[in-house]
Amino acid sequence: MENKVGCILSKTQASAIYDAICVLNRIGARIHTTVENDGESNFILVFEGKDGKINARVIKEMFAIKREIFTDQSEFATAYGLNAV
């Protein structure tokens, strides 16, 4: 299940998710969302754990077939080439 970090999401998807994470953190909330995967039979699950780690997983038939784990929002932003705030 190895993959290059910063390749599960498109830059547009990563940017929108990063913005949502920042907004949710302002009210003490964490993200847990799914993203369509270009019409394939799988989807992308993105969530932030209590420890602040950001997880992105491609899910197919209830199994993670690819995954990325980022230690924090800054690492997520860097991996996807975003300007962290």
Image (cartoon, grey):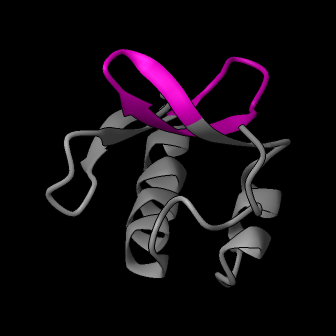
Lateral position of residue 37 relative to residue 9, left or right: left
Q: Note whether 23 is above or below 31 in the view shown.
A: below
Q: From the image, which quarter does the N terminus lie in? A: top right
Quarter residue 79 falls in: bottom right
At a point 63% along the width and 36% down the height, the residue shown is 55
Q: Position of residue 71 (x, y in %)?
A: 85, 42
Q: Residue at x 28, y 48 (%)?
A: 35
Residue placed at 28% from the left, 55% from the top? 37
Question: Which residues are drawn in magenta?
Answer: 47-65
Nearer the observer, 25 or 40: 40
Q: Quadrant of residue 33?
A: top left
Q: Which part of the image, by quadrant, shows the C terminus?
A: bottom right
Image spot of residue 2 (x, y percent) = 78, 45
Residue 26: horizontal and vertical position, in percent?
52, 44
Q: Is residue 68 magenta?
A: no
The image quadrant of residue 60 is top left
The residue at 74%/32% (across/down) is: 52
Give left or right: position of 37 versus 67: left
- Does residue 15 sit above or below 50 in this rendering? below
Q: Viewer-proximal residue, 80 or 39?
A: 39
Between 50 and 79, the one lying in front of the other is 79
Query: How far from the left and from the top, in percent, is residue 14?
Result: 49, 66
Residue sticking out furthest to the left: 39
Count of numbered circles in the view:
0
Prevailing secondary structure class for the magenta stretch in the rendered image: strand
